[in-house]
Each structure stands twice: as structure tokens, then as C-alpha cells.
Image (cartoon, coloured by chain):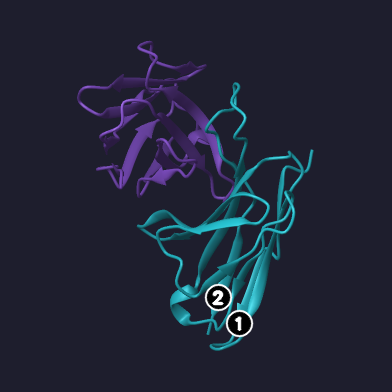
Chain colours: A cyan, B purple
Amino acid sequence: NAGVTQTPKFQVLKTGQSMTLQCAQDMNHEYMSWYRQDPGMGLRLIHYSVGAGITDQGEVPNGYNVSRSTTEDFPLRLLSAAPSQTSVYFCASSSMRGGPETGELFFGEGSRLTVL
Amino acid sequence: AQTVTQSQPEMSVQEAETVTLSCTYDTSESDYYLFWYKQPPSRQMILVIRQEAYKQQNATENRFSVNFQKAAKSFSLKISDSQLGDAAMYFCAYRGSGYALNFGKGTSLLVTP
């Protein structure tokens, strides 16, 4: 059972470089999201999507882009990396169809990004 | 926006003892979900327990139980018979009418032998 798969797990970037964090889920979940986790800050929502072609901003969207061309994939793009984007990033998905899993977020294993 | 507050940055418990982690939240909605997630050193986010606001009965999952006080907007997690494997960061989370979860800042739980 793959669940939510994130790649890469670790990445080091230089300031100004761009990169894409990949996220894929095989649970046919409509809702997908990206969070960043910083020490003492909990998890903060960057962007989310409720279906293919639909995305919206979360609490901390600046410096990040997303797209949702398929149900399965939800990549997060850093356009011009900054040291403030050094963080651990989590992709998470959820079913919107109700049932016993209603509301539960399923997480990927996280991606640690360091921007020098 | 709803806020979730975990007032205990760190807690410590001895093996086999009981510990309670606190969580309060602020909302004007009447229907919502509350969650506790565990994050061990492996970084993986693991769902511990969930509570639907419309249910008056407190959720339980083996050694984990909650004390849900809707009027007080309080949602504490009780861990009974603590084990070394319970050592982790614990996050309280709220989900209202949208699908996003709002997380507290976390409580780091240390379990001592």
C-alpha cells in the first residue's frame, strides 16, 4: 500500500534555484495539500486542491506554486528558493466522500529541504 | 480562522504512568472534527485518535483516550500505561467546514524508564 509518496526525501538548494517537490497518492483522494513544518510552529498550510484543475492558497503560500492536472499528483514548486524556505515539507491527502475516514489526513513521509 | 493552542511545549512521563496532553481551540462552528497526530523521530505523521464534535461520547483507541469538552473548546489526550514507543511530538488538529486541518504547535512527550 503506497498511500502518499513524496520525492525527494532530502534536498539541498542554493538561494535562487528552483525545484519541484513531487507528491502522488493512490487512494483516489480528491483533497490534496502541502504543509511546511518548522520548529515551534507546528504544521502550516501552503496550498491545497479539492480536485483536478482546482487549487487555492493556504496560510503561507508566498514563494510556492502548485498545479493539479490529475487526481493522483500534486507537485509543489519553489520558484526562487530562499533560506526562509528551509523546512520539512509534507504532502497530505484526504477523501471528500464521507465515511469512516472523513476528515483524516494521510501524510507522506516528508521532504527535508535546506536552502543555503 | 480557527486557532489551535497546545500550551505544553514539553511533557515528561514515566513508563507505565498516565499523562494528559492539553489542547484548546477557537471556533464559531458547531460541526467539526478534532484529531491527535503523533510524530515520532522518523518524521511520519500518524493518526492517534479522532473525535466528531456532534458525538458526546469521548473517543478511545486502546491506551489513548480524549476528554472532549465542547462548551469549553477543550480536547485533551490521555495516554495510559505509557510506553517508550509513545515518545514523540503530538499535534492537536482541527477541521471545520473546509478540508484543511489547522494544527497546534505541538507537545514533545518524553517517556522515561
Looking at the rendered structure, the secondary structure element under dot 2 is: strand
- Residue at 42 percent across and 42 percent down: it is B91
Looking at the image, how many numbered discs can be counted on the residues?
A: 2
Among the 4 quarters of the image, the one containing residue A41: bottom left
Looking at the rendered structure, the secondary structure element under dot 1 is: strand
Location of residue A21 with respect to A80 vertically, above or below: above
- Residue at 62 percent across and 78 percent down: it is A12
- Residue at 37 percent across and 46 percent down: it is B106
Identify the residue position indicated by label 1 in the image.
A13
Among the 4 quarters of the image, the one containing residue A95: top right
Circle 2 Cα neighbour tier, 10 Å, few/some/many (<14 / 14–19 / ≥20): some
Q: Does residue A35 appear to the left or right of B13 in the view shown?
A: right
- What's the amino acid at mark 2? Thr
Say the numbered circle drawn on residue A114: 2
Question: Distance between the Cα atoms at labels 1 and 2?
Answer: 6 Å
* Subunit ID for the residue under disc 1: A
Residue B48 rendering spot, x and y as whole percentages = 51, 30
- What's the amino acid at mark 1? Leu
Query: The N terminus of chain A is located in which quarter?
Result: top right
First in residue order: circle 1 vs circle 2:
1
